Each structure stands twice: as C-alpha cells, then as structure tokens.
Image: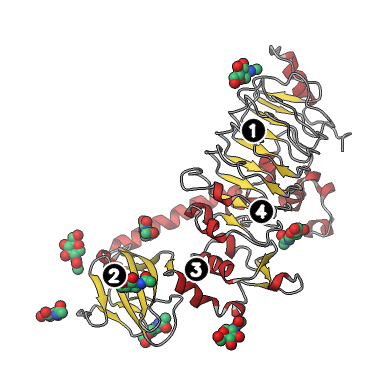
Amino acid sequence: MTSRLYPGRLLLLLCLLHGSKETCPSVCLCVSDRVSCSSSGVTKLPPSLPSFSVTLDLSHNHLSWLGTGSFNGMPRLENLRMAHNQLGSLGHGVFHNASSLRHLDLSSNKLNMVEQHYFQGLWRLEELLLFDNKIAQVEAGTLSGLSSLKKAYFSLNQITHFPFFSIQDHSHPFLTMLDLSSNRMSHLPWEDVKALPGLVQRGLYLHNNSLICDCSMYSVFWHWDLRGYDSLRDFVDEHTCTIYGDPRAAIRFLRHTRFFHNCTVEKALSQPVTVLLSNVLVSDGERVRLDCLTGLSGTDLSFTWLSPSKGYITTASVNDTLMSLFPNGTLEIEEAKVNDSGLYVCTAVDMKQALNATREVNVTVLLPSAESFNTGYTTLLGCVVTMVCILIYLYLTPCRCSCCQPKPPAIPIENYNPSTLTSVFSPSLRDHPKIQANRHVAFMEPMLSGGGTEWTTES
Ligand SMILES: *[C@@H]1O[C@H](CO)[C@@H](O)[C@H](O)[C@H]1NC(C)=O
Ligand SMILES: *[C@@H]1O[C@H](CO)[C@@H](O)[C@H](O)[C@H]1NC(C)=O
Ligand SMILES: *[C@@H]1O[C@H](CO)[C@@H](O)[C@H](O)[C@H]1NC(C)=O
Ligand SMILES: *[C@@H]1O[C@H](CO)[C@@H](O)[C@H](O)[C@H]1NC(C)=O
Ligand SMILES: *[C@@H]1O[C@H](CO)[C@@H](O)[C@H](O)[C@H]1NC(C)=O
Ligand SMILES: *[C@@H]1O[C@H](CO)[C@@H](O)[C@H](O)[C@H]1NC(C)=O
Ligand SMILES: *[C@@H]1O[C@H](CO)[C@@H](O)[C@H](O)[C@H]1NC(C)=O
Ligand SMILES: *[C@@H]1O[C@H](CO)[C@@H](O)[C@H](O)[C@H]1NC(C)=O
C-alpha cells in the first residue's frame, strides 16, 4: 500500500519550485489550496501544514490521536478528510480555530464515543461522516451548535441511544439526512422521533437496527410508509423488528403487517391519524377519484371532505353532478378543472367508537399541454423535435453513457460518493470497490478487475 507510486511527484516538484512562501510537508502533495497527505503512512499530523489549505486529505493513514488546536493555523480549512485512520478519540478543542470547516470525514476509524465537545464551534459544518466506527454512545450535546448541518452519517456503529431530542424545529433548519442505520437500537424514544422536524423525519434512516416490534414503533413507520419516504422504500427488506426481543423471531415489518393488526385501533384512539398523500396529478377535464382510506375501518363510518373550491362536502350536502361522494368515502370529481386543485382533507368519523381519522390529498390539475392536435403546428413541432433529436444524437453521442447511467441507489452511505471524498491525488482504485465495480473504470485499468466481464473473455 505505502509503496505505491505517486502520480504527482512531478507536481510536487513544480509546486516547490514555484517558490510558495510556505513549504509543503515532504509526505504531502500541495496543489493550489489542496493538500493531500493520504496514504503516506503518517502516524502523526505532519508539522507545519500550509495555512492556505482549503482541502486537507489525511485519509488512509495511521493517525490515532489529535490534540488541542491541531488545525489552529488553518483558518481557511473547509474540507477535512480523515477516513481510514486509527482515531480512537479526539482531544478537547481539536477543531479550535477551524470554524470554516464545512465537511468533516471521520468515517472508518475507531471512535468509540462521540463526546459533547468534539464538534464545538463548527457552526458552518454541513456534512459529518462518522460511519463505520465503533461508536456506542453519542453524547446529548454533540449536535448542538451545528446549526448548518445538512447531512450526518452514523451508520455501521454500535449506537444504542441517540439524542433525538436535541434536534428541534429551529436548531438544525437544514438537516435532511440523519443516517442511523445498522446500529444497535432496540428501543427508540418514539415521542421524540415523532417530534423531529418533518425534513429530518423524511431523511431519517433506521433500518438494520435491532428494533423490538411494538405498536408505537409500527405506528411511526406506518405513517412514514404512507408518506412514501425513500428511507423506507429503498430498504424495505432491511426494516426488521424482533418479537419479544428474540433475534430468531425477526420479521420484515414493512412486508408482513399481520402482527400489527391490532395496532391500528390503538393508534386511532390516541390521536387522529393524518396522512398526507403525495400529489395526485390529473389533466384538465379528467375524472379523478380520491379515496379516504384511513386507519379506521368498519361499516359505521361517515365521511366529510373539505375541498378547496367547494368547502365541506358530505353525503347529504352533495348537490353537484360534477362531484359525488361514495359510501366508502371516495370522492369523485367528474371533470377536474384547474380551479379544483388544492388540498382535499377527508375526515372519517366512527360514531360508535368516537374516533376520527383524517386523510389529506394534494390534487394538482394540469392544463392540457397542447390545445389542439389537429393544427399544422403539431406536425411542425414534431418535425422540429425530430431534427433536434437527430442533432443531439449526432453531436452529443459521447455523453450518452453519463446521461443514461442508472441513478445511483439511494443508500445513504453511497449517496456520499467516496470518490468525491478522496482528492485527485488520492489512493488507487484498489481502495474503492465501488469504483472498481464500474465497468468504465475497469476498462481503463484492466489489471484491477477481478475478471469475468465480457471484454476479458474476448482477449
Ligand atoms: C485562535 O483563536 C483565538 C481566539 O479564539 C485567537 O486569539 C488566536 O489568535 C487564534 N490562533 C490562531 C493560530 O489563529
Ligand atoms: C446490518 O448491520 C450489521 C452490523 O450491525 C452489518 O454487519 C450488516 O452488514 C448490515 N446489513 C445490512 C444489510 O446493511
Ligand atoms: C388481535 O385481537 C384479537 C381480538 O381482540 C385477538 O384474537 C388476536 O389474537 C389479536 N391479534 C394479535 C396479533 O395480537
Ligand atoms: C341544489 O341545487 C339546486 C339547483 O341546482 C338549488 O336550487 C338548491 O337550492 C341546491 N340545494 C342545496 C342544498 O344547495
Ligand atoms: C369506493 O366505491 C367506489 C364506487 O363503488 C369505487 O370505485 C372505489 O374504488 C371504492 N374505493 C375504495 C377505496 O374501495
Ligand atoms: C375558475 O376560476 C376563474 C377565475 O379564477 C373563474 O372565472 C371561473 O368561474 C372558475 N371556474 C369555476 C368552475 O369555478
Ligand atoms: C371528531 O370530529 C368532531 C367533529 O368533526 C370533533 O368535534 C371531535 O373533537 C373530533 N374528535 C377527535 C378525537 O378528534
Ligand atoms: C400540492 O402540490 C403543489 C404542486 O405540486 C405544491 O406546490 C404544493 O405545495 C402542494 N401542497 C401541499 C400542502 O403539499
């Protein structure tokens, strides 16, 4: 590993010859405001790191400790990469005077705890990567003060408790990703989780923990599932819970809901169930049916819709040939008009049990895209589009690959592409199975491929 050739020895020389006022540590490469000391085998922070650095890459080394003010002389430092080291803990004030930091990567280290003081003063920090450590505890105040935080990755640790309560409506206004998957949380403070800001709930990843099945847990996921959160959709099978905490009795609770059959009523008893469906899109003039499926079931339900254009609609008051309300609560709009767009709220009331439940549907009625299809303009437009397509095909073909590449899977860790994490000087492809798997790269570096792909059999 350490005997690898540096692709940029020449650059280093050039850099030094250039006669910058500050010298680059011998184990590092410095180009512009980037300093890379990755895979250089250092066990300590190289002395006299250049003060102009904006990006500092120390990943793939043997750092085991960082002391007070380690980055004190680097006021412009924004990106600090220290993945794949041996850091077991951080001293007080490590990031003292490093408050420009926006991106901090401490993934794949040996941290066993996240102490309150670790990230103090990093109010500009946007991305915090702590996945693949040995973290068992995250102290309550860890995230306080990180008011710019957008994404935090705690996956693949041993966390049993997380201070959800420290994330409140105005404390972290930009937080949209909190990855706590693959940890060891069996009980969550569900009231705190439900109180998280909506954006945080949407980006909260909890799969592959050892959750214990119960109704309060199920109720939370039930709501998220109905809202169609990616965190659930992308990991349906990884959402498991154990019955009575017995690991042998693990069920995939997003697939098998039978066990929670009796939970629905409990849920409705305690509070009205509100479900916001994703947008219903219809074209002008089309018929649309909005169902009123709530947690409530039974034959004695009565339904009321509140529509944006016509106010309250009940079975008794419906006086409109254009709208009908079926006994099962479904509201039908015969010919949707643009004016019918808006938020429809259905309330189902179970008189006998004195239960209410609410369902919301956001309806958007779109104007037809082309008014008349029989005019010459349609044909003309068709011709123009075809021409443009041909031109694009002829001139932009080389870009085809990047355009048509499938969207990367929304696995939270991989969302954060490790290849953007390591700089241009950074270690070989060997360290990145993800890149290695990419045929494109494999083609250019056939030695790295494991073989078995089409083109290797050709040779
Ligand atoms: C670090 O910050 C303190 C104020 O908090 C300042 O007095 C000191 O000069 C700074 N040190 C460096 C090396 O920038
Ligand atoms: C689940 O978590 C364990 C560690 O807790 C990890 O080894 C495993 O790879 C994870 N599985 C998935 C599918 O993420
Ligand atoms: C649900 O409740 C019914 C009757 O109240 C009971 O017979 C049934 O066993 C319960 N189901 C589960 C999964 O607890
Ligand atoms: C229903 O519509 C008719 C005419 O279309 C009108 O005379 C009548 O008052 C309406 N009834 C209600 C309850 O709005
Ligand atoms: C409600 O009844 C209408 C008319 O019978 C039907 O078209 C619709 O699918 C039903 N909705 C649900 C949710 O069962
Ligand atoms: C729709 O809105 C326009 C003005 O915004 C109004 O003139 C028209 O009468 C409305 N149509 C219906 C069916 O309410
Ligand atoms: C149910 O709805 C009625 C009126 O629609 C309201 O008075 C009552 O407070 C609601 N009950 C609950 C539990 O929300
Ligand atoms: C409903 O959908 C429209 C258009 O898609 C969107 O602008 C609006 O914010 C949505 N409303 C709610 C309450 O989600």
Residue corresponding to mark 1: 79
In this view, the residue in front, 320 or 238, is 238
Relative vertical location of residue 363 with respect to residue 52 in this rendering, above or below: below
Please state if 393 lies on the left or on the right of 418 as rendered: left
Image quadrant assignment for residue 302 = bottom left
Residue corresponding to mark 4: 161
Q: Residues within 10 Å of mark 4 (few under 14, many from 20)?
A: some
Tell me where residue 236 appears, x and y as whole percent.
Answer: 62, 67
Tell me where residue 131 appears, x and y as whole percent.
Answer: 70, 48
- Who's the residue at 26% across and 68% down the image? 337
Please state if 362 lies on the left or on the right of 239 as rendered: left
Q: Nearest to the eye among marks 3 and 1: give it.
A: 3
- Who's the residue at 73% across and 36% down the image? 82
Measure the alpha-carbon separation of dots 3 and 4.
26 Å
Q: Residues within 10 Å of mark 3 (few under 14, many from 20)?
A: few
Tell me where residue 93 appears, x and y as whole percent.
Answer: 67, 28
Measure the alpha-carbon separation of dots 4 and 1.
29 Å
- Judge: label 2 CB < 8 Å from ligand 7: no
Disc 1 marks which amino acid? Asn
Q: Residues within 10 Å of mark 1 (few under 14, many from 20)?
A: many
User: Which tag, 3 or 2, sits closer to the chain's start?
Assistant: 3
For the image, the number of numbered tags is 4
Residue corresponding to mark 3: 226
What secondary structure is found at the residue carrying circle 1?
strand
Specify the quadrant that holds the N terminus: top right
Disc 3 marks which amino acid? Leu
What secondary structure is found at the residue carrying circle 2?
strand
Residue corresponding to mark 2: 306
